[in-house]
Amino acid sequence: MKIGILGAGTWGTALARMLSNTGNDVVIWSAIELEVEEYSRTRRHPNLPGVKIPEQIDFTVDIKSACVDKDIVLFAVPSVFVRSTAIKVAKYIDNSQIIVDVAKGIESETLFTMTQIIEKQMFEMHRYPQIVALSGPTHAEEVALDLPTTVVAACQNLETAERIQNVFMNTCMRVYTNQDVLGVELCGALKNIIALAAGIAVGFGYGDNTKAALITRGLAEITRLGVAMGCLEETFSGLAGIGDLIVTATSKHSRNYRAGYLIGTGMKPEQAVKEVGMVVEGINAIPGAMHLASKYGVEMPIIEAVNAVIYEEADVRKTVSSLMKRSKKSELPKSALNLNFEHTVIKNREGLNMKRVITYGTFDLLHYGHINLLKRAKALGDYLVVALSSDEFNWNEKHKKCYFTYEQRKALLESIRYVDLVIPETNWKQKKIDVHEYHIDMFVMGDDWEGKFDFLKEEGVEVVYLPRTPEISTTQIKLDLNKK
């Protein structure tokens, strides 16, 4: 593969070395001419001691040459430079290429993740490449030494994620796939803030108990926000979630943990960043995290505490005391009584051969035609799963824009008594995966899709096409409203 890597930092360089050693043609771009000259001459990176950069890797300051005719263009610049870099390269990208992003962060002004920023800039230049987020518990210092590492390649198009899996996977790097791109990216951005909290606590003099509490409850905060934004809860217990959080909040290689430690000892945040000598993404991610928590009405006390210490010069001891004195709560999301009741109901239904039904759709401008379809689908079984098209899927694949966001449409569906579970639909090919993951017995769609999903019968699923309510449709509602 021909691969262009944008950014000559430790992570970009470590990945370039790995990809070159597995037979790929790699070029690294940097905007800093002195870096290009030094790395080309010495074949060394100052922050990767003992690591030799392969002779076959080229360095360039010409960003065009790092993009044109490449199979993969990899963004390895700090999060604050992702947008400006995307603007520079958009005109050189074509639709056959795959963009892989390894930067982690949230843009505070737009609340976009890194792949969302890249996608937006590509769209404005009428470029539509596949974009993959590559994330997980990865320190460049260890990848550059060929130590065993695992990562996640996240893309709504599973086939593209699998292509990147094949390119990046080797005897030292094991790659898993995931279609929950937003969840993976939220984990990557927000775990840096929790790592700051862990470092601050240790620097101030607190012990392992405190650090473990911050990691555990920090993950609970990140998961709450992710689920509120429509992400899959399972993502947060995976490599991009708990895996990346553990390594970032405990490792000597973690710049976020080190910066937090220095701040905990009394050093000013700007001094700590200077001492670390590299970008501290957790500090950059705090404003975006605070805005997201407010937007989705999610309580995130640890991230709020880090914000207070970093940006409001709050006293660490008083801040920790405030966290400890918060009102009493249960660790369980629901009462034990409710959980036991739900478990008993499901168990009893399973004993009676509970029939699971799934249907798919956008369900924008929810109307009685939708209700009729859901009612009839539920009547065919005991448990109804609705796969709801994500905003990105609607825009990129269906080429239509919804009036309501995914989160709003999900909330509406969840309020309907016929619906038991709402999951995101992020690509056309996930149906085979869903019917097995959710133990589906029957697949239901409107009869305007007649015959299109008969291939699911090979998966052992009954396929039913229900007549739609003829006099009503979302498209007709929009047309009628426009006439008025």
Image (tube, helix red, strand yellow):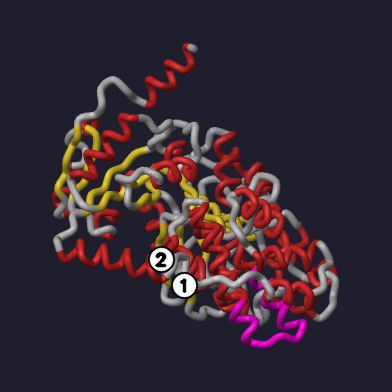
Q: Main secondary structure of the magenta part?
A: helix
Decide: few, some or many residues near mark 1? Use Cα within 10 Å; few <14, some 14-19, many ≥20: some
Res 176 label: 2
Q: Position of residue 41 (x, y in %)?
A: 71, 68
Q: Which of the 4 quarters of the picture holds residue 178? A: bottom left
Residues tagged 2 and 1 counted as in contact (Cβ below 8 A): yes
Q: Tell me if I can see residue 54 in this picture.
A: no
Q: Is residue 85 visible?
A: yes
What's the residue at 44%, 55% (across, down)? 180
Q: Secondary structure at mark 1?
A: strand
Left or right: where 406 falls relative to 446: right
Number of other residues with Cα within 10 Å of mark 2, as a class: few under 14, some 14 to 19, many 20 or more = some
- The percent coordinates of residue 32 (x first, y second) are 75, 57
Name the image quarter holding the N terminus: bottom left
- For the residue pair 44 and 163, the one nearer the viewer reads as 163
Depicted 108 relative to depicted 175: above or below: above
The residue where tag 1 is placed is 150
Which residues, given as a range, are shown in magenta? 194-213
Depicted 272 relative to depicted 452: above or below: below
Q: Position of residue 474 (x, y in %)?
A: 38, 26
Amino acid type, label 2 = Tyr
Mark closer to the chain start, 2 or 1: 1
User: Disc 1 marks which amino acid?
Assistant: Thr
Q: Residue at x 21, y 31 (%)?
A: 447
Question: As drawn, is 188 to the left or to the right of 439?
Answer: right
| Secondary-structure class at tag 2 | strand
Per the model, the C-alpha gap separating discs 2 and 1 is 8 Å
Choose top left, top right, bottom left or bottom right for residue 176: bottom left
Magenta stretch holds residue 334: no
**Residue 65 x/y as whole percent:** 61, 48
Residue drawn at (62%, 52%) of the image? 292
8 on left or right of 240: right
